[in-house]
Protein backbone atom coordinates (compact mmCIF):
# COMPACT_ATOMS: atom_id res chain seq x y z
CA UNK A 1 0.00 0.00 0.00
CA UNK A 2 3.02 2.32 -0.14
CA UNK A 3 2.68 5.78 -1.65
CA UNK A 4 -1.02 6.18 -0.77
CA UNK A 5 -2.19 9.05 1.41
CA UNK A 6 -5.55 8.80 3.19
CA UNK A 7 -7.69 11.91 3.31
CA UNK A 8 -10.20 12.15 6.18
CA UNK A 9 -12.68 15.02 5.86
CA UNK A 10 -15.46 16.79 7.74
CA UNK A 11 -18.15 19.33 6.89
CA UNK A 12 -17.03 22.95 7.22
CA UNK A 13 -20.50 23.96 8.47
CA UNK A 14 -21.67 21.30 10.96
CA UNK A 15 -18.16 19.83 11.59
CA UNK A 16 -19.46 16.25 11.35
CA UNK A 17 -17.23 13.64 9.76
CA UNK A 18 -17.95 12.81 6.12
CA UNK A 19 -16.31 9.40 6.48
CA UNK A 20 -18.67 6.46 5.96
CA UNK A 21 -17.47 3.09 7.30
CA UNK A 22 -20.49 1.28 5.79
CA UNK A 23 -19.73 2.09 2.14
CA UNK A 24 -16.20 1.10 1.16
CA UNK A 25 -14.23 2.38 -1.81
CA UNK A 26 -10.69 1.10 -2.44
CA UNK A 27 -11.28 -1.28 0.51
CA UNK A 28 -11.51 1.64 2.98
CA UNK A 29 -14.34 3.73 4.45
CA UNK A 30 -15.53 6.25 1.86
CA UNK A 31 -16.04 10.01 1.81
CA UNK A 32 -19.83 10.47 1.75
CA UNK A 33 -21.17 13.48 -0.18
CA UNK A 34 -24.77 14.36 -0.94
CA UNK A 35 -25.08 15.13 -4.65
CA UNK A 36 -27.48 16.52 -7.20
CA UNK A 37 -26.69 15.37 -10.74
CA UNK A 38 -28.95 16.74 -13.46
CA UNK A 39 -32.40 16.37 -11.84
CA UNK A 40 -31.64 13.52 -9.43
CA UNK A 41 -30.51 13.84 -5.82
CA UNK A 42 -28.59 11.06 -4.09
CA UNK A 43 -25.14 10.24 -2.76
CA UNK A 44 -21.65 9.86 -4.14
CA UNK A 45 -19.01 8.00 -2.17
CA UNK A 46 -15.40 8.92 -2.97
CA UNK A 47 -12.19 7.08 -2.19
CA UNK A 48 -10.29 8.49 0.74
CA UNK A 49 -7.03 7.72 -1.09
CA UNK A 50 -5.64 10.96 -2.50
CA UNK A 51 -5.43 10.65 -6.27
CA UNK A 52 -7.88 7.75 -6.61
CA UNK A 53 -10.82 8.42 -8.94
CA UNK A 54 -12.80 5.42 -7.68
CA UNK A 55 -16.30 6.22 -6.46
CA UNK A 56 -19.76 4.75 -6.00
CA UNK A 57 -23.09 6.34 -6.98
CA UNK A 58 -26.37 5.93 -5.09
CA UNK A 59 -29.65 7.26 -6.55
CA UNK A 60 -27.77 9.47 -9.07
CA UNK A 61 -26.39 8.46 -12.45
CA UNK A 62 -22.72 8.09 -13.33
CA UNK A 63 -22.76 10.51 -16.28
CA UNK A 64 -19.34 11.31 -17.72
CA UNK A 65 -18.51 15.04 -17.70
CA UNK A 66 -21.66 15.96 -15.73
CA UNK A 67 -21.23 18.62 -13.04
CA UNK A 68 -22.67 17.82 -9.61
CA UNK A 69 -23.84 20.10 -6.84
CA UNK A 70 -22.35 18.63 -3.65
CA UNK A 71 -23.71 19.13 -0.14
CA UNK A 72 -23.20 17.74 3.35
CA UNK A 73 -25.26 14.56 3.93
CA UNK A 74 -25.80 15.67 7.57
CA UNK A 75 -26.71 19.40 7.49
CA UNK A 76 -27.46 19.58 3.72
CA UNK A 77 -25.48 22.81 3.27
CA UNK A 78 -23.58 23.06 -0.03
CA UNK A 79 -19.82 22.81 0.20
CA UNK A 80 -18.00 26.10 -0.38
CA UNK A 81 -16.70 27.01 -3.83
CA UNK A 82 -13.80 29.46 -3.92
CA UNK A 83 -12.39 28.78 -7.35
CA UNK A 84 -13.05 27.21 -10.72
CA UNK A 85 -11.20 24.18 -12.05
CA UNK A 86 -9.29 24.33 -15.32
CA UNK A 87 -12.05 22.09 -16.75
CA UNK A 88 -14.52 24.94 -16.19
CA UNK A 89 -16.46 23.38 -13.28
CA UNK A 90 -16.52 24.69 -9.70
CA UNK A 91 -14.09 23.18 -7.17
CA UNK A 92 -15.49 22.45 -3.71
CA UNK A 93 -13.56 22.71 -0.47
CA UNK A 94 -13.70 19.85 2.03
CA UNK A 95 -12.10 20.41 5.44
CA UNK A 96 -9.47 17.88 6.44
CA UNK A 97 -9.81 16.40 9.92
CA UNK A 98 -6.15 17.31 10.62
CA UNK A 99 -6.45 20.92 9.41
CA UNK A 100 -6.32 22.21 5.89
CA UNK A 101 -8.53 21.69 2.88
CA UNK A 102 -8.78 19.39 -0.10
CA UNK A 103 -10.19 21.01 -3.24
CA UNK A 104 -11.91 18.70 -5.70
CA UNK A 105 -13.55 19.34 -9.04
CA UNK A 106 -17.28 18.82 -9.39
CA UNK A 107 -17.11 17.47 -12.96
CA UNK A 108 -17.42 13.67 -13.14
CA UNK A 109 -14.10 12.35 -14.44
CA UNK A 110 -12.05 15.48 -13.65
CA UNK A 111 -8.71 14.51 -12.13
CA UNK A 112 -7.81 17.91 -10.66
CA UNK A 113 -7.53 18.23 -6.90
CA UNK A 114 -5.22 19.90 -4.43
CA UNK A 115 -4.36 19.86 -0.75
CA UNK A 116 -3.87 23.18 1.01
CA UNK A 117 -2.65 23.80 4.54
CA UNK A 118 -2.52 27.08 6.46
CA UNK A 119 -0.21 25.63 9.10
CA UNK A 120 2.77 23.54 7.94
CA UNK A 121 2.43 21.47 11.11
CA UNK A 122 -0.96 20.22 9.87
CA UNK A 123 0.68 18.89 6.70
CA UNK A 124 3.41 17.17 8.70
CA UNK A 125 0.78 15.73 11.06
CA UNK A 126 -1.15 14.23 8.12
CA UNK A 127 1.92 12.49 6.73
CA UNK A 128 3.27 11.51 10.16
CA UNK A 129 -0.04 9.81 11.06
CA UNK A 130 0.03 7.98 7.72
CA UNK A 131 3.51 6.64 8.46
CA UNK A 132 2.22 5.07 11.69
CA UNK A 133 -0.61 3.34 9.83
CA UNK A 134 1.68 2.10 7.07
CA UNK A 135 -0.38 3.76 4.35
CA UNK A 136 1.86 6.54 3.09
Image: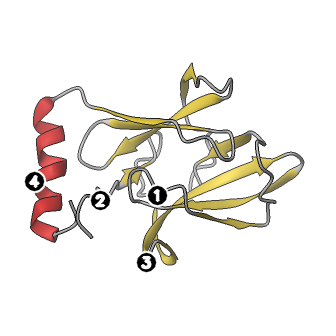
Name the residue tied to disc 3.
27
47 w.r.t. 78: above or below = below
Residue at the (9%, 66%) spot, across then down: 132
Q: Position of residue 105 (x, y in %)?
A: 58, 36
Tell me the crowding category of disc 3: few under 14, some 14 to 19, or many 20 or more residues within 10 angstroms, Cα based: few
Circle nearer the N terminus (2, 1): 2
Whole-Å distance between the Cαs marked 4 and 2? 13 Å
Whole-Å distance between the Cαs marked 3 and 2? 13 Å
Name the residue tied to disc 1.
18
Residue 16: which quarter of the image? Answer: bottom left
Q: SS for tag 4? A: helix
Tell me the crowding category of disc 2: few under 14, some 14 to 19, or many 20 or more residues within 10 angstroms, Cα based: some
Name the residue tied to disc 4.
128
Q: Position of residue 62 (x, y in %)?
A: 77, 58
Name the residue tied to disc 2.
4
Residue at the (78%, 42%) spot, across then down: 66
Residue at the (68%, 61%) spot, across then down: 43
The reply to whether discs 2 and 1 touch (Cβ–Cβ < 8 Å) is no
Whole-Å distance between the Cαs marked 4 and 1? 22 Å
Amino acid sequence: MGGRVRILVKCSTCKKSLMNPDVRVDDLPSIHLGAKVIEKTGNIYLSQIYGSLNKKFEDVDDIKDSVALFFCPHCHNPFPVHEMCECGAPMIDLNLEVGGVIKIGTRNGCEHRSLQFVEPDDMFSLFHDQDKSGLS
